[in-house]
Amino acid sequence: MSGNENGVKVKLLREDVRVPADVLPEAQETYIDNFLAATRETGKLMLFACDQKIEHLNDDFHGEGIDLADNDPEHLFRIASQGVIGVMAAQRGLVAQYARDYPDINYLVKMNSKSHLVKTTQDDPYSSQLYSLGSVLAMRDAGVNIVGVGHTTYLGSEYESTMMSEAGELVAEAHAHGLITVEWIYPRGEAVADEKEATVIAGAAGVALCLGSDFVKVNPPDATDKNNSAELLAIASQAAGRTGLVCAGGTTIDAEVFLSQLYDQIHIGGAIGNATGRNIHQRPLDEAVRLTKAISAITFGGCSIEEAMDIFNGKADFTLDSIAA
């Protein structure tokens, strides 16, 4: 496959990578290496989100409609190693337990997490940092292929100032060491009337920019009578400025519907990729691998929905070599 409908070049050269000013001079080449690795030399992000084992406990890994293989945590690593992704996002301990067996995966360490047991009706959400950046850098120095870190802020929570402070410091320290950053920002708490309202989502994107993050993960806004979700997402993408915006994948849905939404998020909504977990890992291994390739064909290769569906259905293939040089 050509990998691009328009015949345009999609691969970035090293000199095309915009290095933030808070990346120390001695870490700039490392930052460029990590940015190119995470985005597969395209500037686009395909983030395989595997942080739900804390966020949703075992609810997302065992039960009705979920393939039995998903209860084994190694299923995540098999998908990431056999499929086509940019980065695999997971907590430090999960990465530490499996990374030696899967050394070629690009890892993005999720620095904070919370379970879903304490509901918003009981207390506003707070996700505290679980470990120091130093412990993550030690893993990297020991040979684990860590290219970045991620962090969640619940905007509108009464604890938002603490989470924003942690996020801002984390971004600065990570950049100083040449790591890329992804900020998960979800408006949530008693003060937030509608966490998927377009203006609130755009505000969240702008906060990520002010925190200095390279990428921000948001929920797609709900459609209104006047605009669909992708059209409203375009407001958030513009508000994010030089912070690349990606959308959360949400619960598992039909593959063609999911790929169509992704295509619109990128081509109408201005997103630079996706952050998908359950829609991938709740499927059998072969199907999950094919879906990563279909997602990456749209994200990295600029393929159409029809081309992506051929890949998902096994009628065509997509590899990193398919990306136009």
Image (cartoon, rainbow, N blue to C red):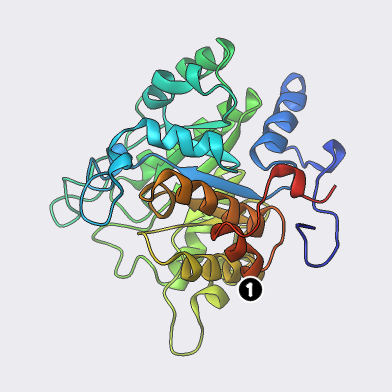
Image location of residue 136, percent across then percent down: 49, 20
The furthest residue to the left: 122
Viewed as shown, does residue 282 lie left or right of 209? left
Question: Which residue is under mark 1?
Answer: 268
Q: Quadrant of residue 314?
A: bottom right
Front residue of 28/69: it is: 69
Which residue is the extreme one toward the front? 315
Direction from residue 285 to residue 206 in the image, left or right: right
Query: How dense is the environment of label 1, judged by Cα within 10 Å: few (below 14), some, or many (20 and up)?
Result: some
Compared to residue 13, the image places residue 313 above or below, namely below
Residue 201 screen position, x and y as percent: 46, 64
Residue at screen point 56% across, 21% down: 103
Q: Nearer the viewer, residue 193 or 140?
A: 140
Q: Identify the secondary structure beneath mark 1.
A: loop
Of residue 207 and residue 59, the one placed in the foreground of this image is 59
- Figure disc tally: 1
57 in relation to 169, above or below: below
In which quarter of the view is residue 186 placed? bottom left
Amino acid under disc 1: Ile
Looking at the image, residue 216 lies above or below residue 220 = above
Where's residue 269, x and y in %? 60, 70
Q: Foreground residue, 254 or 314?
A: 314
Instruction: Identify the residue shown where x is 53% and y is 65%.
Output: 259
Quick check: can you spot residue 63? yes
Residue 166 seen in the figure:
no
Question: What residue appears at the point 60 percent right and 67 percent down from the top-left corner?
Answer: 263
User: What residue sits 83% from the left and 36% below the top?
Assistant: 14
